[in-house]
Amino acid sequence: MSTIALITGANSGLGLATAQALAHKGFDLIFLVRSREKGEQARKQILEKTPQARIDLFFADLTNMDSIRQVCQQIHQKYDRLDCLINNAGYAPAQLEFTRDGYEKSFVANHLGHFLLTLELIDLLKASGKGRIINLSSAAHAMGKSRRFFLKHNSKMNIWSAYGDGKLANLLFTVALANRLKGQNVSAYAVHPGVVNTQFGRNFTDWWKYGFGFLRPFMITTEEGAQTSIYLATADLPESYNGGYFSKSKPARILNKDVNDYNAQLLWKRSEEALGERWML
Ligand SMILES: NC(=O)c1ccc[n+]([C@@H]2O[C@H](COP(=O)([O-])OP(=O)(O)OC[C@H]3O[C@@H](n4cnc5c(N)ncnc54)[C@H](OP(=O)(O)O)[C@@H]3O)[C@@H](O)[C@H]2O)c1
């Protein structure tokens, strides 16, 4: 029986490199992307190198909760199990934007959209009997503050604190999942991929644009950056790794004192309130 992995943001950067490697290892892949054109292009690129790859495309924007609920229904119609969910899509905003509900948009894409996606697919991960959830966080979680989560139109925020909050939430969500899913054969891991030359930061303007441009030649490649996600998707992992944070394919030091069970539980509760829905795992 083949292993089925769903990757968000599989059309670009780390998502594409992870998809390429997993296709090569014989995984069946589900791409969750927001652009049909970019998704088709990525699938074509992988098939050129791995002609036997099986890749299904589904579409949703992670800031649009209706589109996520809809796509999860479509996935349920086609699949009765999911072995690996890689919550990879994400970005740092060039400027702060807020959703109609007043939440900062990158936080919604980086955390809340993936929160909803994961919980809407949790039955499929449980059905796998060995489900894995891999959340792309970042060392930038160090800049996050849990007290800022879900503050509406927060004037004290800047683009890096907003990104840090999202990446801190990815880590706390991982902790919360591991706590809640204990004994249910689904485990969760958070990743810092390194500083990787992808499309990340290409939306920046002014100083950040030039700063990032200058640093690009020193960044690692997408193939190198994808290694930790690939490791967590494929290796035999000890139970003690469940809920952990990983870089360079090994446990890494958490850089933020806000990472604890209390904040993980609080994030869960606030995420449910923002979505107007509760999940019992
Ligand atoms: N690159 C780094 O140095 C670095 C370091 C630490 C962590 N990370 C994390 O690694 C992950 C992958 O980033 P990357 O570096 O590979 O960047 P990337 O090349 O820019 O890829 C980001 C992916 O996320 C998708 N995406 C963004 N907003 C979305 C939304 N609202 N709905 C659906 N998809 C959306 C993008 O889709 P489109 O192509 O349609 O825009 C793209 O496929 C991110 O979570 C990032 O925070 C990256």
Image (tube, rainbow, N blue to C red):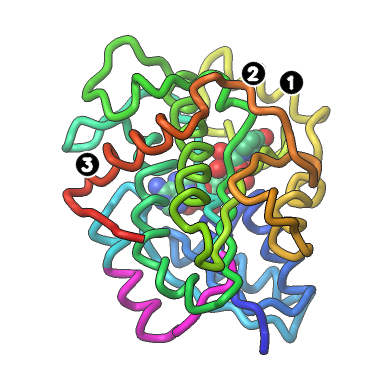
Mark 1–mark 2 Cα distance, whole angstroms, equals 6 Å
Report the residue marked by disc 1.
214
Residue 273 percent coordinates (x, y): 20, 42
Tag 1's secondary structure? Answer: helix
Label 3 vs label 2: CA separation?
36 Å
Q: Residue at x 47, y 51 (%)?
A: 177
Check the image and report above or below for 103 versus 209.
below
**Residue 227, image x, y percentages:** 78, 51
Q: CA distance from mark 1 to mark 3?
A: 39 Å
Residue type highlighted by circle 1: Phe
Residue nearer the viewer, 125 or 229: 125
Q: Is any part of residue 199 visible from this angle?
A: no
The magenta segment: 70-84
Tell me which corner region of the image, top left, top right, bottom left or bottom right, holds residue 247. Answer: top right
Identify residue type, mark 2.
Tyr
Local SS, label 2: helix
User: Residue at label 2?
Assistant: 210
Task: Residue at 54% x, 64% y: name it.
Answer: 186
Q: Are marks 1 and 3 in contact (CB under 8 Å)?
A: no
The percent coordinates of residue 188 (x first, y second) are 57, 53
> Residue at the location (63% across, 79% down)?
28
Q: Earlier in the sequence, mark 3 or mark 2?
A: 2
Quarter of the rendered image showing ligand 1: top right
Q: Which residue is mark 3?
A: 274
Query: What amino acid type is highlighted by mark number 3?
Result: Ala
